[in-house]
Amino acid sequence: MTTLPLPRLLMVLGSGETSPTMVTPHQRVFSRLGAPGEVPALLLDTPFGFQENADELTERVQTYFRESVGRTVGVASLRSRAAMQADPVAAARALAALGQARWVFAGPGSPSYALEQWSGTPVVGLLDERLRTGGAVVFASAAALTLGAFTIPVYEVYKVGQEPRWLEGLDVLGRATGLRAAIVPHFDNAEGGTHDTRFCYMGERRLASLIDQLPDDAFVLGIDEHTGVVIDVASGEIEIVGRGRVTVRTHSSSTEFRPGDALTVTRIAEIAGSGERVVSVPVAVASDVVDETSIAASLAAGDVEAAVTGLLMLQADPEADSRTVGALIAALGERAANAPVDRESIVGPYVELLLEMRMAARAEKRFADSDLIRDRLAEQGVTIRDTPTGPEWDLA
């Protein structure tokens, strides 16, 4: 029995992530991953985790996807480092759910706040893993800003008046595609009226200053409001969705694309001056430091051996907090109790043996025995299909 691999999709939206404009693009991404009920989907609430109305925003996102898109979206609540440290069991559960999700969404809020909470945590590796093994990462607005190699601290510049500068981004886009970019959503914003708020509220003067600060091999990937790109990481093909433009702006040029235009990762790389697509593979960084965060990461990734080893090392540390150790042991126990079981790998050898016996019975014209094997397997939920190349089976 052959199972097709899941597509690896990175969907980046300039804004309008919960608007009617994006209902069809969201539905199309979901449909590529599987039928409803087959795609574990999660909202990552970090970017707006500092806001007083965080609960309301979470409910609003879930309602939109349930009622407009037709998909149920759970929540991986990782609103702050402080919350994760205060309740490591809840953090471990959220990270485990994030590791098992096949569709991950994050949206509005503060990009600099999200970076501060996510940097150096298992979240970054889990996003990389999703784009490496199959599934979709859907980031919009503030969250979209964090995906590139460089990130604008929007609030600090636009609201506080700090000088335009870049923060180090998560570079999820770079590791997935090789593109060394700064993603700038809200590229055509016009809220300022009498003053320039394009380019995520930076305006031309500040954007020009920011581009001057970029390395020669980096560029800006601008995405208009109510517009997005869906990047097929495996093929490098890019679909523009929504109603606006996507802009590749370098130190010396600006190239625009619209929905329906042919666009690929290779084409963007050529415009940006890198000449060809270079796909980099995420590399795990070895560390001798064992703490609750690294153990939680092992649990989220399903690496029980590493989690147990880390727990033993942490427990041996005389300065380790006993409550933290106990909480992580409880999380490990819960993971073990609810570990996914690949039923087909367990029953497969027995089914194959029975199918060999059935084929032998049919060859010897013992059709009653052959039918008996088929019927008994069907009673246990095993469906057999006879094909020109031999029998195939599925387990209900």
Image (cartoon, rainbow, N blue to C red):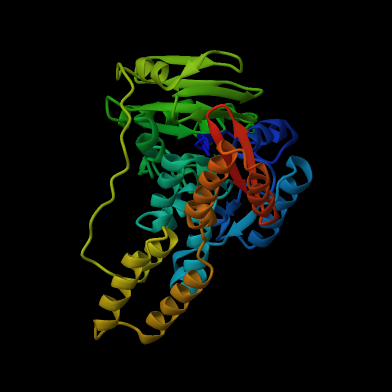
Task: Pick out the residue farthest to the left.
Answer: 288
Across and down, in percent, residue 237 comes to: 48, 22
Q: Quadrant of residue 45?
A: bottom right
Going 41% across and 16% down the picture, which residue do you hit?
Answer: 267
In this view, 377 is above or below 303: above
Q: Work out whether residue 220 or residue 20 is closer to the camera in this orientation and state it.
A: 20
Across and down, in percent, residue 371 comes to: 68, 45
Number of numbered labels in the structure image: 0
Q: Is residue 155 left or right of residue 305?
A: right
The answer to whether residue 152 of the structure is visible from this angle is no
In this view, 55 is above or below 222: below
Going 69% across and 35% down the picture, which residue do you hit?
Answer: 27
Q: Is residue 105 left or right of residue 236?
A: right
The answer to whether residue 210 of the structure is visible from this angle is yes
Q: Work out whether residue 362 or residue 162 is closer to the camera in this orientation and state it.
A: 362
Q: Is residue 348 left or right of residue 292?
A: right
Q: Work out whether residue 15 or residue 267 is closer to the camera in this orientation and state it.
A: 267
Going 48% across and 47% down the picture, which residue do you hit?
Answer: 111
Across and down, in percent, residue 122 comes to: 39, 57
Across and down, in percent, residue 258 comes to: 58, 16
